[in-house]
Image (cartoon, rainbow, N blue to C red):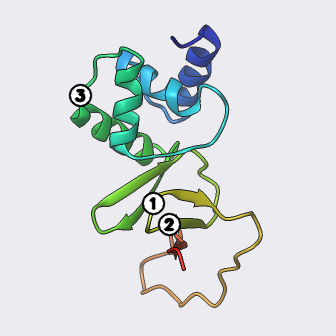
Amino acid sequence: MATTEEQAIGTRWLARGGIRPTRQRVALAKLLVGDGRHRHVTAESLFDAVRARGEKVSLATVYNTLRAFSEAGILREITVNGSKSYFDTDTTNHAHFYCEDTGELSDVQSGEVAVTNLPEPPKGTEIAKVDVVIRLRKS
């Protein structure tokens, strides 16, 4: 069962994104940030974790909530295969390793990747972000 401290952390995190703290959103926020550690989750892995805690929530709600958290800027969505997305609680600019064999996403150490010489964006647009995913496989 989640602690009062985890709930408080989750509720503050939601407030930072301007997200109304419903029961289900708070339950998901506690799992995502309640212990203060960064993590990468898929909708399915978060669904399994919240159900294991005894919360009643549908997979569709988890998907919709993760999208809302991403749109609010408190989660970062990383797409690794056209349809597979991970959600990262660390919203700072950083690169990722993706292991094709295991499906695991992990952070590249800060400062190890430099993105330079970006092209000029088309007129009337600006670069919003650059995602770097380095794909790995066992050799």
| Label 3 – label 1 distance at C-alpha | 26 Å
Q: Which residue is mark 2?
A: 99
Residue under the point 65% across and 81% down = 115
Where residue 8 appears, as percent x and y from the top left, is: 60, 16
Using the image as rendered, state which of residue 79 and residue 92 is in the foreground. 79
Where residue 14 appears, as percent x and y from the top left, is: 51, 29
Callout 3: SS: loop
Residue under the point 35% across and 42% down = 43
Residue under the point 53% across and 89% down = 120
Callout 2: SS: strand
Q: Which residue is mark 3?
A: 58
Where residue 117 appears, as percent x and y from the top left, is: 63, 91
Where residue 100 appears, as percent x and y from the top left, is: 44, 68
Residue 96 lies, with reference to residue 2, above or below; the image says: below
The answer to whether residue 20 is visible is no
Give the number of the disc on residue 102: 1
Q: Are marks 2 and 1 in contact (CB under 8 Å)?
A: yes
- The kind of residue tagged 1 is Thr
Residue 90 lies, with reference to residue 34, above or below; the image says: below
Callout 1: SS: loop
